[in-house]
Amino acid sequence: MFTRAVTRLSRKRPPSEIHTNDGSNVQDQNLKGTQRWSSSLDSLLEDPDGVEAFKDFLKREYSEENLLFWLACEDFKRTEGRDQMQKKAQHIFNTFLSSKASSQVNVEGQSRIGEQILREPHPLMFEKLQEQIFNLMKYDSYSRFLKSEKFHTLQSSEESEISSSRQGESAPKRASRIYNT
């Protein structure tokens, strides 16, 4: 049994499964712009330009609040200091989770967040709700974004910029770039 486990662990992983220490995919690091955004929602959310493009798309679909909630939760996780954390928790609740919220998100369990929890916040208090919104975006909005005219327009303009920048590239430099990637 031990031999089987060692054999299984020693198998080479395909390049698509190799990750860096921070958990990101090695292949994603070589991609830029729309190519990287299309590899995963995580990659898109790591790029400020990707977030802006996705937010514009969601705004047109009247579901921008999902991304805003996700971003607010990410910011909340990095918050230090009890007072600051309480203010941000209350803001997230009032803006996204309250029945009177201006940008209410539709998640299970939002009714369980009450005044007591808001008085004693902790960095992961919104984690389950944030995960629901992430999955909603991943399996719904993100796939529509990748098929949208906005994404294809950004992709085309990016490809045009790349090809025009390579016009003046010498043959040896171009060969080096091609064979060394």
Image: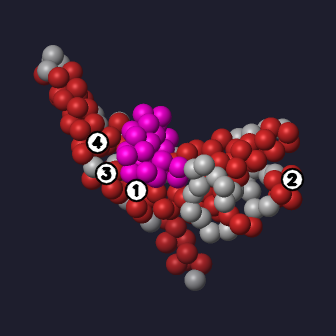
Q: Residues within 10 Å of mark 2 (few under 14, many from 20)?
A: few
Compare marks 2 and 4 and give the one earlier in the sequence.
2
Quadrant of the snapshot with the C terminus: top left
C-alpha gap between disc 2 and disc 4:
42 Å
* Quarter of the view holding residue 115: bottom right
Say which amino acid is labelled 4: Lys
Say which amino acid is labelled 2: Glu
Q: Are marks 2 and 4 in contact (CB under 8 Å)?
A: no
Residue 162 sits above or below residue 127 on the image: above
Frontmost of labels 2 and 3 is 2
Give x and y (percent) for residue 108. 62, 69
Q: Which residue is mark 4?
A: 150
Q: Which residue is mark 3?
A: 146
C-alpha gap between disc 1 and disc 3:
9 Å
Give x and y (percent) for residue 56. 40, 40
- Whether residue 99 is visible here, answered yes or no, is yes
Q: Which mark is residue 120?
A: 2
Compare residues 102 and 179 and report the one nearer the observer: 102
Q: Which residue is mark 1?
A: 141
C-alpha gap between disc 2 and disc 1:
33 Å
- Whether residue 44 is visible here, answered yes or no, is no
Compare marks 2 and 3 and give the one earlier in the sequence.
2
Compare residues 35 and 155 and report the one nearer the observer: 155
Q: Which element is circle 3 on?
A: helix
Q: Which element is circle 1 on?
A: helix
What residue span does the magenta drawing correspond to?
Answer: 41-66
Frontmost of labels 1 and 3 is 1
